[in-house]
Image: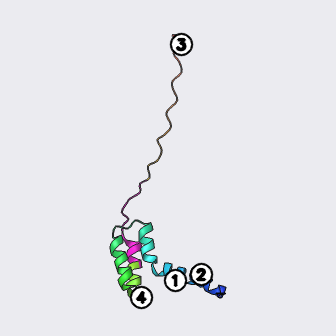
């Protein structure tokens, strides 16, 4: 049972990065909350074995509109100073 320790290093250092690179369009679509996430995942699963399908899914994931739009609202301007107190003169 004394296996070679290199086999234990093969999966995390070789297979996981290759798998992440294979699903890079899906990861980008998930992070960007892409509107067509399901279709991008489907194209990535079924057509990414062709390089054209992988590039198509990658371009689609990058160019697709995000599901949520973020807006920047500037902070309110500071309140003007209060007028001096009235002393009755």
Marks 4 and 3, how far apart at CA: 82 Å
Instruction: Report helix, strand or loop for mark 2.
Output: helix
Name the mark nearer the viewer: 4 or 3. 4
Crowd band around label 4 with a 10 angstrom C-alpha radius: few (<14), some (14–19), many (20+): few
Q: Earlier in the sequence, mark 2 or mark 1?
A: 2
**Going by the picture, which residue comes out furthest to the top?**
89
Give the tally of numbered discs. 4
Query: Which residue position holds label 2?
Result: 13
Query: Which residue position holds label 3?
Result: 87
Instruction: Report helix, strand or loop for mark 3.
Output: loop
Measured from the top left, where is residue 6 in percent x and y?
64, 86
Seen at 66% across and 85% down, the residue is 5
Seen at 46% across and 47% down, the residue is 74
| The magenta segment | 58-71
Name the mark nearer the viewer: 2 or 3. 2
Crowd band around label 3 with a 10 angstrom C-alpha radius: few (<14), some (14–19), many (20+): few
Q: Earlier in the sequence, mark 4 or mark 3?
A: 4
Q: Which mark, residue 55?
A: none
Crowd band around label 2 with a 10 angstrom C-alpha radius: few (<14), some (14–19), many (20+): few
- Left or right: 6 with respect to 85? right
Magenta run includes residue 84: no
């Amino acid at each position: 049972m004394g296996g070679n320790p290199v086999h234990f290093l093969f999966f995390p250092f070789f297979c996981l990065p290759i798998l992440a690179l294979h699903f890079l369009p899906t990861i980008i679509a998930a992070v960007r909350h892409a509107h067509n996430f399901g279709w991008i995942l489907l194209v990535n699963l079924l057509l990414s074995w062709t390089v054209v399908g992988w590039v198509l899914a990658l371009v689609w994931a990058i160019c697709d509109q995000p599901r949520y739009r973020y807006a920047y609202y500037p902070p309110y301007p500071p309140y003007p100073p209060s007028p001096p107190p009235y002393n009755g003169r």
